[in-house]
Image (cartoon, rainbow, N blue to C red):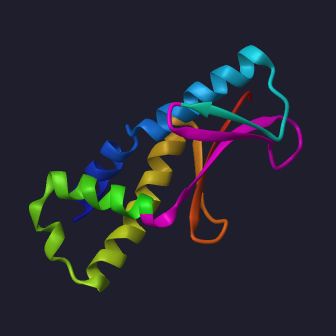
Amino acid sequence: MKELTRKAAQKASQEEVFQALAYGVLKVRARRIAPNQIIKTGEHELLVAEDENGDGLVVQIILPLERMEAMAQAKAGELDGSVGGWNEHERREWLAAFWDELARYLAKWQDIKMRRGPGENMTFEKAVSR
């Protein structure tokens, strides 16, 4: 199960949404876009915001948790066909491990922070500069 979680997180980290964040950061750097602006990259709308310390800028995208869960399960299903037979408890347990692994993977390899919220959403953010 750990191997499935790791591989699914690796596959998920290559999704277009994370590439859009990187592209959004480049746009903000090149155009010196101010906070509270929305930039569009493909089908994604990204928000330019101040970081939590107010020292710099981040690019954020907020996605519905339901959409992210579907993506996670699709990635797991590509790797292991038995995923569709999981009961609700197994699914929730696996998703909890998956989110931890995806957050670790995104932070390590793409400098993307991931957190739950607001509400039934997930927020992903990448710093414009360090």
Any part of residue 25 in sight: yes
Instruction: Say whether residue 95 is magenta.
Output: no
Location of the N terminus by quadrant is bottom left
Percent position (x, y) of residue 97? 38, 66
Q: Nearer the viewer, residue 114 or 118?
A: 118
Any part of residue 109 in sight: no
Quarter occupied by residue 76: bottom left
Location of the C terminus by quadrant is top right
Quarter occupied by residue 90: bottom left
The residue shown at (32%, 70%) is 94
Residue farthest left in this picture:
81
Percent position (x, y) of residue 44? 55, 39
Q: Nearer the viewer, residue 63 or 50?
A: 63
Residue farthest top in this picture:
30
Instruction: Say whether residue 59 is magenta.
Output: yes
Q: Does residue 106 appear left or right of residue 46 in this picture? A: left
Please provide the residue range marked out in magenta: 42-66
Q: Does residue 82 appear left or right of residue 114 in this picture? A: left
Q: Does residue 4 appear left or right of residue 65 in this picture? A: left
Is most of the magenta stretch helix, strand or loop?
strand
Report the label total. 0
The residue shown at (57%, 25%) is 23
Q: Is residue 34 above or below residue 17?
A: above
The residue shown at (72%, 14%) is 30
Percent position (x, y) of residue 81? 10, 61
Percent position (x, y) of residue 93? 35, 77
